[in-house]
Amino acid sequence: MKFETSIGDTVTELNIEPEENTLLVNSSSKDYSFYTQPNGRKLLRIGNKLYKIDNVEFEKHTVRFTINGQWCSVDVRDEQDLLMDEMGFKTAADIGEGQ
């Protein structure tokens, strides 16, 4: 699954292979694992680093959450969003479909 993320002015390309537990970050391959604890906290391990993720909120393409206690806001676009952008179309989330 291909994604593009933006944090401020920094754009990162991600390609996630869940069957293989690998992700490609800007052409650099890394192993990962992702767990959800019974209390709702999510644990993301990338290589030998562990990240605690809480307070996840979604709004259109924006995901807000705390990672190791620090708030973060990320704009996320999947393959379909990227293709629609490339073709000049707006996605349902962009036009507020159903709202």
Image (spheres, rainbow, N blue to C red):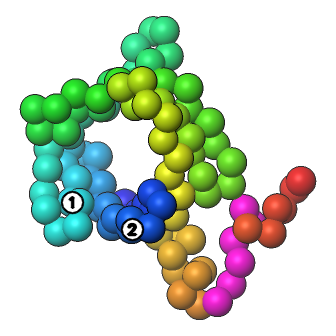
The residue sitting at the top extreme is: 39
In the image, taking residue 71 as reference, residue 46 lies left or right, namely left
Identify the residue at horizontal 56%, vertical 32% (top origin).
56
Q: Quadrant of residue 94?
A: bottom right
**At label 2, which amino acid type do we have?**
Val
Identify the residue at horizontal 17%, vertical 68% (top origin).
27
Q: Is residue 55 above or below residue 8?
A: above
Alpha carbon of mark 2 to alpha carbon of mark 1: how far?
14 Å
Q: Is residue 79 magenta?
A: no
Asked if one can make out residue 53 in the rendered structure from this viewpoint, the answer is: no
**Residue with the mark numbered 1:** 24
Circle 2 sits in a helix, a strand or a loop, which is it?
A: strand
Label 1 Cα neighbours within 10 Å, binned few <14 / some 14-19 / many ≥20? some
Residue stretch rendered in magenta on the structure = 88-93
The x and y percentages for residue 19 are 24, 46
Q: Is residue 17 above or below residue 70?
A: below
Q: Is residue 89 above or below residue 52?
A: below
Q: Is residue 89 magenta?
A: yes
Q: Quadrant of residue 70?
A: top left
Label 2 Cα neighbours within 10 Å, binned few <14 / some 14-19 / many ≥20? some
Chief secondary structure of the magenta span?
loop
In the image, taking residue 49 as reference, residue 94 lies left or right, namely right
* Number of disc labels: 2
**At label 1, which amino acid type do we have?**
Leu
Identify the residue at horizontal 68%, vertical 48% (top origin).
59
The x and y percentages for residue 60 are 68, 55
The x and y percentages for residue 95 are 80, 69
The image's mark for residue 11 is 2
In the image, taking residue 62 as reference, residue 5 lies left or right, namely left
